[in-house]
Image: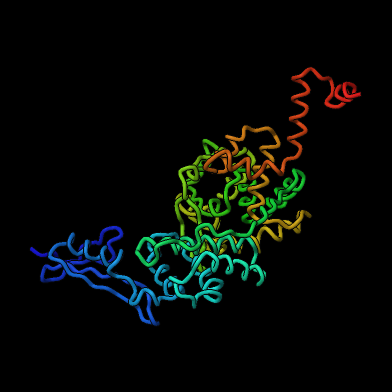
Amino acid sequence: MLPKHRARRGRSEGSIYQRSDGRWVGSVSLGTHGGKRVRRVVYGETKAEAAAKLRAEQLGAGRLPDAHAVKLEEWLGRWLTNIQPTVEPATHGAYRRQVDGHIVPRIGGMKLRDIRLVDVEAFFSRCLSDRVSPAMVRKLGTTLSVAFNHAVRVGMLTLNPARGARRPIAKRPKIHVLTGEQAMKLVQAAKRERLGVLIVLILDAGCRPGEALALTWQDVDFAGERITIDKSLEEICGRFRVKAPKTASGRRTVDLTAGTMDALNRHRAAMLAEGRDVRKGPVFVGKRGGRIGLSLVRRDLLKPLCHSAGVPMTNLYSLRHTCATMLLAANINPKIVSERLGHGSVVITMDTYFHVLPGMQVGAVEAISAALGYTSATSDLGTKRA
């Protein structure tokens, strides 16, 4: 008996379904050409046959008409369409903004097969002349390289013209952290705010702001005084999406201080009084009960808090940086700090934070002096040199 409903398509098969007469049909979009969408349709007696024909269209037979005449703008439109199901929405959105805002306006009219390494480097120079930041130019280089690699895979290009292109050097972004005194002032001010415990939690756990906003009450273990982090909240065009961590290290359990647990307990009581779901619902919700995003937290919570606490205006990620800095300054094992932050490697932790801890070098000198039997890090050495 023939199925009454279309069969679910397999991964990376495009759109494949069975018709009422038993034949299988596959279709795939190949982007746009001349302002018109290009779509290929194949048929097969079996699902496997249709899938094989569809893959052939995707990998070669389905190239854009007159491949030698395809412009970069057309190819990038096709590429963005093809990769959309395989990347995170935020990643795809970033690619789209870079293509529309920087790449297409400057070199989109060039033919894909005419682009050479020198053209890519000239594009970088033009961006810098237009006052595009070096960090953004490096991102644009990555986006171009990914798109060109895709063109190589499907036979549109033989080589990636962006490979080996020299990108501008981007300065490491400066990490801003609060002093211990400033952090304490901020915590005291946060106690008076409806969602102030969010600030306290990020300072304590060192979690990413999106991870804190994604927490549900099921993730809070009041008996064990810890939280489980296994997701993050993402806001795209005003819509919220809860996503899984990119790496296994992002899934972790973090022990919290008694003070933070007390603050969470008081917050839960306040949310219960508001009629919120304190069993399975989100820990942090707006006054109307819905999810809240980073922009709202910065504007309506953190900025007023910094003002009332008398501390310099900071951002939510600086609270995470402050946690890491305080732990490392207290000589906590970097491996423990790395696990708390959800880093994939302790190398990432030390590479990110070591330069903000000049006091650790002083501690290193004192430790070596003690080990070598010097009574003072300066007096004995000064005497020997004299």
The residue sitting at 52% across, 64% down in the picture is 117
Tell which residue pokes out farthest to the left in this image: 1
Would residue 290 be seen by someone viewing this image from the given angle? no
Quadrant position of the C terminus in the picture? top right
Q: Is residue 327 left or right of residue 73?
A: right
- In front of the other: 134 or 26: 134
Pinpoint residue 112: horizontal percent, then vertical percent. 44, 71
Pinpoint residue 77: horizontal percent, then vertical percent. 43, 72
Q: Please tell me whether residue 22 is drawn above or below residue 167 in the rendered image.
A: below
The residue sitting at 63% across, 45% down in the picture is 352
Pinpoint residue 193: horizontal percent, then vertical percent. 66, 55
The colour scheme of the drawn protein is rainbow
Q: Please tell me whether residue 309 is drawn above or below residue 335 in the rendered image.
A: below
The residue sitting at 75% across, 31% down in the picture is 363
The residue sitting at 36% across, 60% down in the picture is 153
Q: Is residue 214 left or right of residue 168?
A: left
Q: Please tell me whether residue 308 is drawn above or below residue 73 in the rendered image.
A: above
